[in-house]
């Protein structure tokens, strides 16, 4: 027997959708107030345009598409000199795919608490370009399928896969740099036994 799924209009569905859409909006806009505005606008637009929902996709996917569009419009209005296009390719800093995987020994989980790791990961995700961050959040954070993500963003499945790969590679590269830098600074800060008596 499968798990019971909440239905549209049920309080449980509304609460889950509200929380998930807010989280997505906050990841994209990187601002709590903007995310709250996005959620309000997205739910209002969904309610106002309910007659246009044809049932070809899940209601939640349709709602996410509206919220993503609202969040991206909010970004464009906030930074008019830097428009965000879901069709634009973004290059990595060195214009290549990172090949090297850092040796994280000791394991980051041994050095940092879960809260610290969560904060580091959130900051790293927020550093991604919006085009990659949006795909990464929908797929890897919110758990939408590739097909649902493609539908929500109005992208092809290969475009979603490509952007997700690039997002993951950029995250890995940035996390490698962060942990290497942190390891070096921690090694430099440890006083030797002779230095402590100065």
Image (cartoon, rainbow, N blue to C red):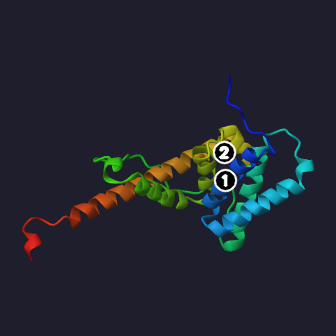
**What residue lies at 68% left-to-right and 68% top-to-bottom?**
34
Q: Secondary structure at mark 2?
A: helix
Do residues under tags 1 and 2 come within 8 Å of each other at their CB atoms?
no
Q: Which mark is residue 8?
A: none
Q: Secondary structure at mark 1?
A: helix
Q: Is residue 119 left or right of residue 21?
A: left
Name the residue at 48% across, 52% down. Answer: 171
Percent position (x, y) of residue 193?
Answer: 9, 65
| Visible residue check, residue 83 | no
Q: CA distance from mark 1 to mark 2?
A: 27 Å
Residue 41, by quadrant, is: bottom right
Q: Residue placed at 64% from the left, 64% from the top?
A: 29
Name the residue rendered at 55%, 50% in the picture.
167
Q: Which residue was labeled with disc 2?
A: 159
Residue 57, image quadrant: top right
* Number of on-image labels: 2
Location of the C terminus (image quadrant): bottom left
Disc ID at residue 19: 1
């Amino acid at each position: 027997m499968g798990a019971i799924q909440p239905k549209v209009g049920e309080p449980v569905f509304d609460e889950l959708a509200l929380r998930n859409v807010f989280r997505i909006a906050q990841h994209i806009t990187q601002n709590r107030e903007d995310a709250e505005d996005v959620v309000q606008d997205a739910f209002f637009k969904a309610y106002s345009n309910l007659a246009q929902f044809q049932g070809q996709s899940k209601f939640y996917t349709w709602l996410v598409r509206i919220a993503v569009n609202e969040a991206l419009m909010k970004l464009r209005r906030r930074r008019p000199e830097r428009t965000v296009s879901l069709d634009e390719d973004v290059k990595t800093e060195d214009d290549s795919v990172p090949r090297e995987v850092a040796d994280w020994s000791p394991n980051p989980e041994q050095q940092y608490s879960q809260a610290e790791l969560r904060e580091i990961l959130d900051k790293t995700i927020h550093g991604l370009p919006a085009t990659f961050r949006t795909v990464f959040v929908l797929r890897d954070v919110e758990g939408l399928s590739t097909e649902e993500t493609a539908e929500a963003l109005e992208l092809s499945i290969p475009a979603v896969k490509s952007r997700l790969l690039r997002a993951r590679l950029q995250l890995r590269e940035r996390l490698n740099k962060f942990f290497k830098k942190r390891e070096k600074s921690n090694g430099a800060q440890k006083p030797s036994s002779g230095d402590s008596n100065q």
